Image: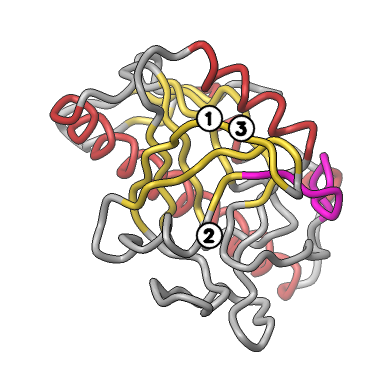
Amino acid sequence: MKIARLTFVSATGLLLTASAFGYFFWYKPAFKSTVKKQASDNALYKEAADKKETLLRLTTKAERAKEYIADHSFNEKYCFLMDLRIPSGTNRFFVYNLQKDSIEKAGLVAHGSGKYYSETPVFSNKPNSNCSSLGRYRIGKSYYGKFGLAYKLYGLDKTNSKAFDRFVVLHAHECVPSEEIAPATICKSWGCPTVSPAFLNQLQSYIAASSKPVLLWIYY
């Protein structure tokens, strides 16, 4: 996995470094050939714009996470950022190094289905809604349930304050692939951030090594 690095400057708020640019704008075969059709050109321009917006959301959340962490005694080195505006077949769960301003790991994650199994995420804090809840979470203790290893989650905002009571936890499921499958989509959960077993093993190493709680932030 390539590591994305970001450098913040006061003039513009942030400046993309070469490695950060490389993470979100790596070359694909479609970029290597001359595109003659205007429709194809427009699709490429939109893809580039979407990736820039994704990176802007990420860096904005990372800066706000640093402020929250400093005031609430969370792990100062790492946090987990989850961008549900990214399609589910694309990596959208990021292990973010707050000291280096870089993405260390990235993986797929399922969002809540809602009552009608919407492909587009629908958010709610209500019990039995089967929806994802936006906001900051404290990752709690691990346990072994019907999905194997899982981590309790405690919602820290009004938008996710009932997460613990709703049994919203961080866990893995075989239906989530280990690699990107876009433009195809992945399975849905009942509101839990659900990752692949392989990716949860990677997340476990960060959580287990931390003497302080790790912050998870789900945003859109």
Q: Could you tell me which residue is drawn at 37 percent across and 47 percent down?
A: 154
Residue mark closest to the camera, 3 vs 1: 1
Give left or right: position of 6 versus 172. Answer: left
The foreground one among 165 and 211 is: 165
* Residue occupied by mark 1: 95
Give left or right: position of 119 versus 48. Answer: right
Q: Position of residue 163 (x, y in %)?
A: 42, 59
Q: Could you tell me which residue is drawn at 61 percent across and 63 percent down?
A: 111
Question: Element type at marker 1?
Answer: strand
Placement of 1 over or under 50, stated as above or below:
above
Q: Which residues are magenta?
A: 171-181
* Residue occupied by mark 3: 23
Q: Could you tell me which residue is drawn at 62 percent across and 24 percent down?
A: 204
Looking at the picture, which amino acid does disc 1 mark? Val
Question: Element type at marker 3?
Answer: helix
Question: Element type at marker 2?
Answer: loop
Q: CA distance from mark 2 to mark 3?
A: 18 Å
Q: Position of residue 177 (x, y in %)?
A: 84, 47
Q: Which mark is residue 84?
A: 2
Q: Which mark is residue 184?
A: none
Residue mark closest to the camera, 2 vs 3: 2
Q: CB atoms at circles 2 and 3 under 8 Å apart?
A: no
